[in-house]
Amino acid sequence: MSKPQYDRLAADLEAEFGDRLRWVASFDSDDYTYDVRYVREDLKSDLSGLELDTIIHRSMAVFNREHVEDVYFHLGDAESLLVRHERATALHLYLSRNRGVVVKLEADASFRYPDFLDECVGTLRGSDRFRRSGPTDGLPTVTRWLEVTFYG
């Protein structure tokens, strides 16, 4: 894969989600390095550099691809990990064994998974296919799927 277009992804996500996009960071879990590609303006003061640094380093340690694949060894290679919190949703996209990107959205941001994942990867590879992935055709969103699956 050619060099991922992280900044283009961040710009497309900001255009798509506006204030529902919290932050975007690319990472390399082998050497625990990362580059913050976008942080929403209000979070720049809410999350000090040290807090964001801690969050990203912990996510690289706990949610790295090798760890996820060790836990779910019977399911094959991990492509992504979706973690929904009370106040935000995190999508960890794995581009290689050690490289990837974390997209953090507000909890009420709506998107359709795995289409959203495919669109993000396409943007990183240079495709112009990023488009609205919310509930436009009656298909369930991630939020609705979670509600139906886990809450009945």
Image (cartoon, rainbow, N blue to C red):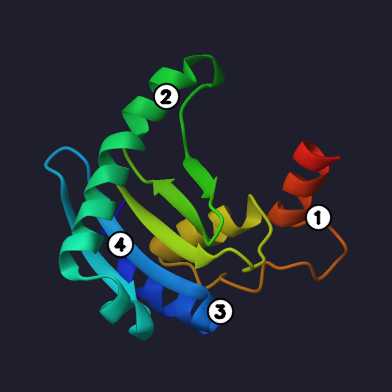
Q: How many marks?
A: 4
Which residue does the numbered mark 3 point to in the structure image? 16
Q: Give how far across and how far down residue 88 sits, in percent.
A: 51, 61
Give the structural element (helix, strand or loop) at label 4: strand
Q: Quadrant of residue 150?
A: top right
Q: Residues within 10 Å of mark 1 (few under 14, many from 20)?
A: some
Q: Give how far across and how far down residue 38 sits, in percent.
A: 32, 74
Q: Earlier in the sequence, mark 2 or mark 4?
A: 4
> Relative to 54, is 117 on the left or the right?
right
Q: Amino acid at mark 4?
A: Ala
Q: Which mark is on residue 25? A: 4
Mark 2 → mark 1, Cα distance in angstroms: 27 Å
Give the structural element (helix, strand or loop) at label 2: helix
Q: Give how far across and how far down residue 121 sits, in percent.
A: 47, 56
The residue shown at (21%, 41%) is 29
The residue shown at (36%, 46%) is 95
Which residue does the numbered mark 2 point to in the structure image? 69
Q: Which mark is on residue 10? A: none
The residue shown at (78%, 54%) is 144
Q: Earlier in the sequence, mark 4 or mark 1?
A: 4
Q: Earlier in the sequence, mark 3 or mark 2?
A: 3
Q: Earlier in the sequence, mark 1 or mark 3?
A: 3
Q: Amino acid at mark 2?
A: Glu
Mark 3 → mark 4, Cα distance in angstroms: 17 Å
Mark 4 → mark 1, Cα distance in angstroms: 27 Å
Q: Earlier in the sequence, mark 2 or mark 1?
A: 2
Q: Do residues under tags 1 and 3 come within 8 Å of each other at their CB atoms? A: no
Q: Is residue 97 visible?
A: no
Give the structural element (helix, strand or loop) at label 3: helix
